[in-house]
Amino acid sequence: DVKVTQSSRYLVKRTGEKVFLECVQDMDHENMFWYRQDPGLGLRLIYFSYDVKMKEKGDIPEGYSVSREKKERFSLILESASTNQTSMYLCASGSNTDTQYFGPGTRLTVL
Amino acid sequence: QQQVKQSPQSLIVQKGGISIINCAYENTAFDYFPWYQQFPGKGPALLIAIRPDVSEKKEGRFTISFNKSAKQFSLHIMDSQPGDSATYFCAGGYNNNDMRFGAGTRLTVKP
Protein backbone atom coordinates (compact mmCIF):
# COMPACT_ATOMS: atom_id res chain seq x y z
CA ASP A 1 0.00 0.00 0.00
CA VAL A 2 1.07 3.52 -0.73
CA LYS A 3 2.08 5.38 2.37
CA VAL A 4 2.28 9.14 2.68
CA THR A 5 3.32 10.32 6.11
CA GLN A 6 3.28 13.81 7.54
CA SER A 7 5.54 14.83 10.38
CA SER A 8 2.85 16.10 12.76
CA ARG A 9 -0.88 15.57 13.17
CA TYR A 10 -1.33 18.72 15.24
CA LEU A 11 0.87 21.79 15.48
CA VAL A 12 0.46 25.06 17.39
CA LYS A 13 2.70 27.98 16.51
CA ARG A 14 2.86 31.69 17.24
CA THR A 15 2.49 34.51 14.75
CA GLY A 16 5.81 35.26 13.08
CA GLU A 17 7.36 31.85 13.70
CA LYS A 18 8.94 29.87 10.88
CA VAL A 19 7.06 26.61 10.40
CA PHE A 20 8.18 23.46 8.63
CA LEU A 21 5.75 20.76 7.55
CA GLU A 22 7.37 17.57 6.32
CA CYS A 23 5.95 14.93 4.01
CA VAL A 24 7.45 11.58 3.03
CA GLN A 25 6.16 9.05 0.49
CA ASP A 26 7.33 5.49 -0.03
CA MET A 27 6.10 4.80 -3.59
CA ASP A 28 8.87 6.43 -5.60
CA HIS A 29 6.31 8.86 -7.05
CA GLU A 30 7.62 11.68 -9.20
CA ASN A 31 4.92 14.14 -8.18
CA MET A 32 4.20 15.62 -4.79
CA PHE A 33 1.68 18.23 -3.71
CA TRP A 34 0.74 20.46 -0.80
CA TYR A 35 -2.87 21.51 -0.26
CA ARG A 36 -4.68 23.35 2.45
CA GLN A 37 -8.21 22.34 3.37
CA ASP A 38 -10.68 24.83 4.78
CA PRO A 39 -14.43 24.39 5.39
CA GLY A 40 -16.47 25.44 2.37
CA LEU A 41 -13.38 25.91 0.21
CA GLY A 42 -12.32 22.32 -0.33
CA LEU A 43 -8.71 21.53 -1.14
CA ARG A 44 -6.63 24.35 -2.57
CA LEU A 45 -3.28 23.68 -4.17
CA ILE A 46 -0.38 25.58 -2.62
CA TYR A 47 2.67 24.16 -4.39
CA PHE A 48 3.61 21.03 -6.29
CA SER A 49 6.75 19.36 -7.56
CA TYR A 50 7.29 17.06 -10.53
CA ASP A 51 10.91 16.26 -9.73
CA VAL A 52 13.68 16.72 -7.22
CA LYS A 53 14.65 20.36 -6.75
CA MET A 54 11.76 21.39 -8.95
CA LYS A 55 8.70 23.33 -7.74
CA GLU A 56 5.67 24.98 -9.24
CA LYS A 57 3.23 27.43 -7.71
CA GLY A 58 -0.32 26.30 -7.24
CA ASP A 59 -3.34 28.52 -6.77
CA ILE A 60 -2.46 30.01 -3.36
CA PRO A 61 1.36 30.13 -2.95
CA GLU A 62 1.54 33.47 -1.15
CA GLY A 63 3.16 33.16 2.27
CA TYR A 64 4.52 29.67 1.56
CA SER A 65 7.62 28.11 0.08
CA VAL A 66 8.64 24.50 -0.53
CA SER A 67 11.72 22.35 -0.72
CA ARG A 68 12.31 19.03 -2.43
CA GLU A 69 15.89 17.85 -1.94
CA LYS A 70 15.06 14.14 -2.20
CA LYS A 71 12.45 12.37 -4.32
CA GLU A 72 10.58 10.97 -1.33
CA ARG A 73 10.42 14.15 0.73
CA PHE A 74 8.55 17.39 0.15
CA SER A 75 8.56 20.16 2.72
CA LEU A 76 6.20 23.10 3.11
CA ILE A 77 7.62 26.19 4.79
CA LEU A 78 5.74 29.08 6.31
CA GLU A 79 8.41 31.78 6.53
CA SER A 80 6.47 33.91 9.01
CA ALA A 81 3.29 32.26 10.19
CA SER A 82 0.12 34.33 10.34
CA THR A 83 -3.26 33.60 11.86
CA ASN A 84 -4.87 33.27 8.42
CA GLN A 85 -2.62 30.27 7.81
CA THR A 86 -4.46 28.31 10.48
CA SER A 87 -5.74 25.35 8.50
CA MET A 88 -5.49 21.65 7.74
CA TYR A 89 -2.51 20.94 5.49
CA LEU A 90 -2.55 17.87 3.28
CA CYS A 91 0.35 16.39 1.40
CA ALA A 92 -0.15 14.06 -1.57
CA SER A 93 2.00 12.10 -3.97
CA GLY A 94 1.30 10.50 -7.34
CA SER A 95 2.58 9.64 -10.77
CA ASN A 96 1.31 10.45 -14.25
CA THR A 97 -0.17 6.95 -14.49
CA ASP A 98 -1.64 6.83 -11.01
CA THR A 99 -3.85 9.04 -8.91
CA GLN A 100 -2.87 11.11 -5.91
CA TYR A 101 -2.47 9.52 -2.51
CA PHE A 102 -2.94 11.73 0.52
CA GLY A 103 -1.34 11.82 3.93
CA PRO A 104 -3.43 12.12 7.11
CA GLY A 105 -3.00 15.88 7.31
CA THR A 106 -1.48 18.34 9.77
CA ARG A 107 -3.83 20.63 11.61
CA LEU A 108 -1.90 23.85 12.14
CA THR A 109 -3.07 26.51 14.54
CA VAL A 110 -1.32 29.88 14.50
CA LEU A 111 -1.95 31.98 17.61
CA GLN B 1 -11.93 31.35 -8.87
CA GLN B 2 -12.95 27.79 -8.40
CA GLN B 3 -12.45 25.65 -11.48
CA VAL B 4 -14.67 22.88 -10.15
CA LYS B 5 -18.00 23.72 -8.49
CA GLN B 6 -19.63 21.14 -6.28
CA SER B 7 -23.10 20.90 -4.79
CA PRO B 8 -24.71 20.44 -2.36
CA GLN B 9 -22.48 21.46 0.55
CA SER B 10 -24.24 18.95 2.78
CA LEU B 11 -26.60 16.08 2.21
CA ILE B 12 -28.67 13.93 4.54
CA VAL B 13 -30.01 10.64 3.22
CA GLN B 14 -31.85 7.77 4.84
CA LYS B 15 -30.23 4.35 4.88
CA GLY B 16 -31.00 2.56 1.65
CA GLY B 17 -31.59 5.78 -0.27
CA ILE B 18 -29.67 7.23 -3.19
CA SER B 19 -27.12 9.97 -2.58
CA ILE B 20 -26.38 12.28 -5.49
CA ILE B 21 -23.59 14.85 -5.58
CA ASN B 22 -23.05 17.11 -8.56
CA CYS B 23 -20.02 18.86 -10.00
CA ALA B 24 -19.40 21.24 -12.86
CA TYR B 25 -16.05 22.13 -14.36
CA GLU B 26 -14.82 24.95 -16.56
CA ASN B 27 -11.57 23.73 -18.06
CA THR B 28 -12.23 21.63 -21.16
CA ALA B 29 -8.61 20.45 -21.11
CA PHE B 30 -9.30 18.32 -18.03
CA ASP B 31 -9.00 14.64 -18.89
CA TYR B 32 -9.40 12.99 -15.50
CA PHE B 33 -12.31 13.30 -13.06
CA PRO B 34 -11.91 11.53 -9.72
CA TRP B 35 -14.05 11.42 -6.63
CA TYR B 36 -12.36 11.28 -3.26
CA GLN B 37 -13.87 10.17 0.05
CA GLN B 38 -12.63 11.59 3.33
CA PHE B 39 -13.44 10.33 6.81
CA PRO B 40 -12.83 12.51 9.88
CA GLY B 41 -9.17 12.59 10.87
CA LYS B 42 -8.03 11.01 7.60
CA GLY B 43 -6.74 12.28 4.31
CA PRO B 44 -8.93 11.95 1.19
CA ALA B 45 -8.80 8.59 -0.58
CA LEU B 46 -9.70 7.83 -4.19
CA LEU B 47 -13.17 6.36 -4.49
CA ILE B 48 -13.80 6.20 -8.25
CA ALA B 49 -12.62 8.09 -11.33
CA ILE B 50 -13.68 8.59 -14.93
CA ARG B 51 -12.18 9.86 -18.17
CA PRO B 52 -14.25 12.00 -20.58
CA ASP B 53 -14.43 9.34 -23.29
CA VAL B 54 -17.10 7.43 -21.34
CA SER B 55 -20.44 8.63 -20.01
CA GLU B 56 -20.74 6.35 -17.01
CA LYS B 57 -18.57 4.25 -14.73
CA LYS B 58 -19.85 1.95 -12.03
CA GLU B 59 -17.99 0.32 -9.18
CA GLY B 60 -20.22 -1.53 -6.76
CA ARG B 61 -22.73 0.92 -5.28
CA PHE B 62 -20.87 3.95 -6.67
CA THR B 63 -21.53 5.35 -10.14
CA ILE B 64 -20.11 8.39 -11.92
CA SER B 65 -22.27 9.93 -14.64
CA PHE B 66 -20.41 12.22 -17.02
CA ASN B 67 -21.87 14.78 -19.43
CA LYS B 68 -19.07 16.23 -21.53
CA SER B 69 -21.21 18.71 -23.47
CA ALA B 70 -22.62 20.18 -20.27
CA LYS B 71 -19.24 19.98 -18.47
CA GLN B 72 -20.90 18.25 -15.56
CA PHE B 73 -20.43 15.01 -13.68
CA SER B 74 -22.09 13.45 -10.69
CA LEU B 75 -21.60 10.74 -8.10
CA HIS B 76 -24.48 8.42 -7.28
CA ILE B 77 -24.33 6.22 -4.21
CA MET B 78 -26.95 3.52 -4.35
CA ASP B 79 -28.32 1.84 -1.22
CA SER B 80 -26.53 4.41 0.94
CA GLN B 81 -25.22 3.07 4.26
CA PRO B 82 -24.27 4.82 7.51
CA GLY B 83 -20.67 3.80 6.78
CA ASP B 84 -20.80 6.01 3.67
CA SER B 85 -21.10 9.08 5.92
CA ALA B 86 -18.06 11.14 4.97
CA THR B 87 -17.03 14.19 3.00
CA TYR B 88 -16.84 13.70 -0.75
CA PHE B 89 -14.72 15.77 -3.11
CA CYS B 90 -14.91 15.85 -6.87
CA ALA B 91 -11.93 17.00 -8.90
CA GLY B 92 -10.86 17.67 -12.45
CA GLY B 93 -7.35 17.49 -13.78
CA TYR B 94 -4.70 16.43 -16.30
CA ASN B 95 -2.53 13.33 -16.35
CA ASN B 96 -4.09 12.03 -13.13
CA ASN B 97 -2.23 14.65 -11.23
CA ASP B 98 -2.62 18.36 -11.82
CA MET B 99 -6.06 18.47 -10.21
CA ARG B 100 -8.43 21.09 -8.93
CA PHE B 101 -10.95 20.11 -6.28
CA GLY B 102 -14.51 21.05 -5.51
CA ALA B 103 -15.49 22.48 -2.14
CA GLY B 104 -16.72 19.15 -0.79
CA THR B 105 -20.05 17.61 0.25
CA ARG B 106 -20.63 16.34 3.75
CA LEU B 107 -22.84 13.27 3.46
CA THR B 108 -24.76 11.94 6.44
CA VAL B 109 -26.62 8.67 6.06
CA LYS B 110 -29.19 8.19 8.81
CA PRO B 111 -29.88 4.65 10.03
Image: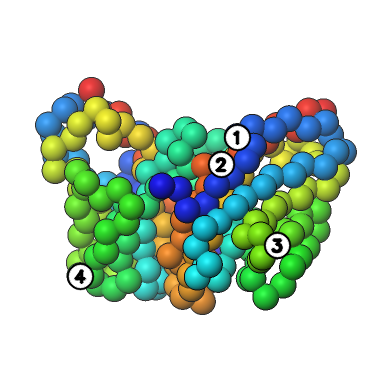
Disc 3 and disc 1 in contact, CB within 8 angstroms: no
Crowd tier of the residue under label 4, counting other residues whose Cα lies within 10 Å: few below 14, some 14–19, many 20 or above: few
Residue at mark 4 to residue at mark 2: CA–CA distance? 32 Å
Label 4: chain letter: A
Of residues B80 and B104, which is closer to you in this image?
B104
Disc 1 and disc 2 in contact, CB within 8 angstroms: yes
Q: Amino acid at mark 2?
A: Gly
Of residues B102 and B67, which is closer to you in this image?
B67
Discs 1 and 4 share one subunit: no
Q: What residue is disc 1 on? A: B9
Q: What residue is disc 2 on? A: B104
Tag of residue B66: 3
Sequence-first tag of 1 and 2 = 1
SS for dot 1: loop
Which x, y percent locates residue B7? 62, 41
Discs 3 and 1 share one subunit: yes
Q: Amino acid at mark 3?
A: Phe
Disc 4 and disc 2 in contact, CB within 8 angstroms: no
SS for dot 2: loop
In the image, taking residue B73 as reference, residue A19 lies left or right, namely left
- Residue ID at (41%, 47%): B1
Q: What residue is disc 4 on? A: A53
Q: Nearer the viewer, mark 1 or mark 4?
A: 1
Residue at mark 3 to residue at mark 1: CA–CA distance? 20 Å
Q: Nearer the viewer, mark 4 or mark 2?
A: 2
Sequence-first tag of 3 and 2 = 3
Vertical comparison of B3 with A17: above or below? below
Discs 1 and 2 share one subunit: yes
